[in-house]
Amino acid sequence: MNDTSSRASQEPVLALRQITKEFPGVVALDRVDLTIGRNELLGLVGENGAGKSVLMKIMIGLIQPDGGTIKLHGEQITLKNSSDAIRSGIGMVFQEGSLVPNLSVMENLFLCNEAGFRKLGILSLRSMRAAARELLAQIKLHIDVDLPVAEIGPAERQMVEIARLLWLSKLYGHDNPVLIMDEPTTVLADKERETLFSILQDIRNRASIVLISHRLQEIVENCSRIVVLKDGKNVTEMPASESRLLKIEQLMVGHSFSADRFHEDEQRTRGEKEILRVENLGKAGWFQPLSFTVGEGEIVGLIGLVGSGKEEVCKCLAGLERADSGSISLDGKKLPSGSPSGAVRAGIGHIPIDRRSEGLALMMNVADNVNLLVLNRLKAGGLLSPVRERKNAHHWVSECQIKTPSIATLCANLSGGNQQKTVISKWLSSRVRLLILDHPTRGVDVGAKDEIYKLMRRLAKEGIGMLVMCDTLEEDIGLANRMLIMKDGRLVEEIDSSPKKKPDPKDIISLIV
Amino acid sequence: MTTVSDRLSRLASIREWIPAALAAVGVWLRRTGTVAQILTLVALVGVFAIGTKGKYLSPANIQTILSLAAIPAILAIGLHLTVVLGGIDLSVQGVASLVAIFVGLLMKNQYNSNDVGLWIIPISLGIGGVAGVINGVLNTRLRIPSFIATLGMSWVLYGMAVYINRAVNIQILDERIFKAINGMVFGIPNIAILAVIVAIIMQFIQDRTQFGRYLYAIGGDEAVAQQGGVKVEKIKIIVFTIAGIIYGLGAALLACRLGVATSRMGNGLLFPTITAVAVGGVALTGGLGGAKNAALGALIVTSLNDGMVLMHVNPYAQQAVNGVVLIAAVALTLDRKKLGFVK
């Protein structure tokens, strides 16, 4: 391993220098450097929103940087799109996959690059099959190349993508391509994970690999060097052999911890009344039976990695999925399982992560969105009363400080923060008892974040219970009264987070990874 | 002695070979997604053979079914391409009506002295192709959903046909072509042979060319295909053009087969064509099914209707049965994972 890392320092394959990328309101990357050596397995870590995925997308040409240079074998290059990147020997295995499900393994391997198998315009299936089998044998994958991709497992799909990228870079004459793997192990079982890493170690002899993962353990075990990103900046890089988990965790979370960013002085203690009671709720394959409660005015943070089952728990609470076992009761009344309208009627509000597609009707105006759930109360003589509609909308617009030119403005024309406030006011207007907030501050600017925090504190004062999943651990800790830690589908720990006694993020990270 | 043992071993190898071949055929059928269709057809034939006391299986009736299925099969092969793409093409009636008028007025007829003979084939294909290019451009460049773009086009073309023809029946007097189309070889209608040839060519293009591969890639996941470098817009325009060309062929054959052309000729073609595509197992969500499915679907729908006529089913009930068949076929083939919301 020492041998390879010394070679890596001599001869970088790909070097990114001072890469900067700004999106409206946020600096996603601030002068980030990244070098990838020959035959290197590089680990890239950082929290959600640290800028890992933006950096990767720049490396494969999906996003253009605002500043900085990219050098391939010492020569400066510009990557206009992903096929440019492929031609330069840089490819990425996406988390969600980039294979066409109805085409066979063989067809996917050579899609868009069939020219070598063509004679008089006709494709030779025999030579394609032979080439496909050979390619897959190189990475020790033995499956029927004629199977549609939809019928093979996630681990095999990943291997097919790797084989495709290796083949393509060879086709374009690169002896040491750069493979980027985004969270490759989240969809894999333990056994498959081991196989993947043994194959990656093997592929390393003819490629450089950038591995992004939340599982620090596997990064430390497998990578030769680790780069840590935080808030769009390089924090550090170090040889993996010298690194310890604890140190990386510290670096990922950082030290800048301003206490009142989350208005902790306004945090109220849990009220007497219990709002939500979840008992032995379980769904096979998603999460093990678990129980917890949310009290009046309490903010409960639900913490865990992607795949820990936290999203699925929230889906069951909102009635979007039917649980296999257990019960959910709100204010002492049992909820029907798997009924979104039942959940809404009982008083559970759900603010989804993707407000553009699920939380708001973007092509409707502010008033219609705010009134959507309470149309029943706005009737006069069996018909909707425009007067009452306007009154209700005005009330909530001023209550939640939604900055909009008028209540007749289309929601599509509002800023992210104001859209989010509109979603929240929609639920408030329906006299919600429990709000599930799925990443409420994702994609909104700093000022709007603050207003959303304030709004959440006020909701708590009014006695509404909240279950929240945040973008960063700091946000979770800062906002919550109590935190529930989930790992691999189980509720592993419950941590108190009252003001002045906020837990240390490092302790929590070690619980979730 | 050696010859005997040779023969024996050859026999043994044949005995091994037959199940292997059968298994290979089975795998091929499963992969091509035609098992359910073939079973449906066999069941239908069985029911009608018993119901009509064998009349259904008489050579004359089988010839009738084959000749009646040919043109719907050709039209379905055109239309199914756009469905594989994930869209749909509803312009078949308009294209057919306009092509019919050109066929009537350019071939030997009682109204003018034109007689283009076989030149009518490239002319018909050309008209269909132009309509298809327009469909494709409307869909890709103006980004109009294909079902609206092609539905609109259908009425534009139909309007043109009515404007030219004013619903007059034009007798086509070209005896040679009439006979060729209604003739038979070894008891098989020529037109059915033609339909099979069209199906084989199209299926070959789908299986063995880059164009075919891209067609299914777009139908399977357009975003991934685009990212991989498929020229999505170009392929879409080509697909709509080929579909139009095939409608042109179907319409010319229909007019020549009937010996009469009128602007009303296209009316009522859309429903059986779409039913054939769906029944054949081409998923409306795109990416699944080929020309053989479309042709098989047309054969199933024609067999069903022929059987119902022979069994004296009430004609109105027959229409209702067709409607039920369409809905059931779509329900069975739809890939619901691909649909977020059904609108």
Image: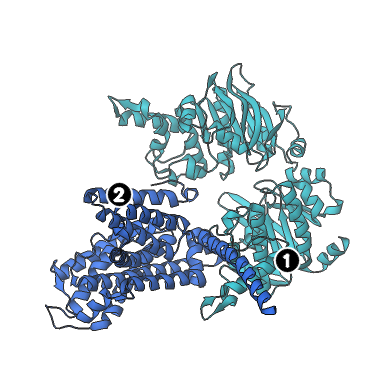
Chain colours: A cyan, B blue
Q: Is residue A469 above or below residue B226?
A: above
**Picture residue at 19% right of the left edge, 71% below the top:** B261
Using the image, name the chain to which the residue with label 2 belongs.
B
Callout 1 amino acid: Gln
Callout 2 amino acid: Val
Find the distance from the CA under tag 1 to the CA under tag 2. Answer: 55 Å
Q: Quadrant of residue A495?
A: top right
**With B157 as the anchor, is B31 left or right in this view?**
right
Which one is nearer the viewer's eye here, A360 or A89?
A89
Using the image, name the chain to which the residue with label 1 belongs.
A
Q: What residue is pinned by disc 1? A: A138
Label for residue B321? 2
Residue A124: image x %, image y %?
A: 57, 75
Label for residue A37? none
Which one is nearer the viewer's eye here, B210 or B21?
B21
Q: Quadrant of residue A443?
A: top right
Which one is nearer the viewer's eye here, B163 or B76?
B76
Q: Quadrant of residue A437?
A: top right
**In the structure shown, which secondary structural element does the residue marked by tag 2 occupy?**
helix
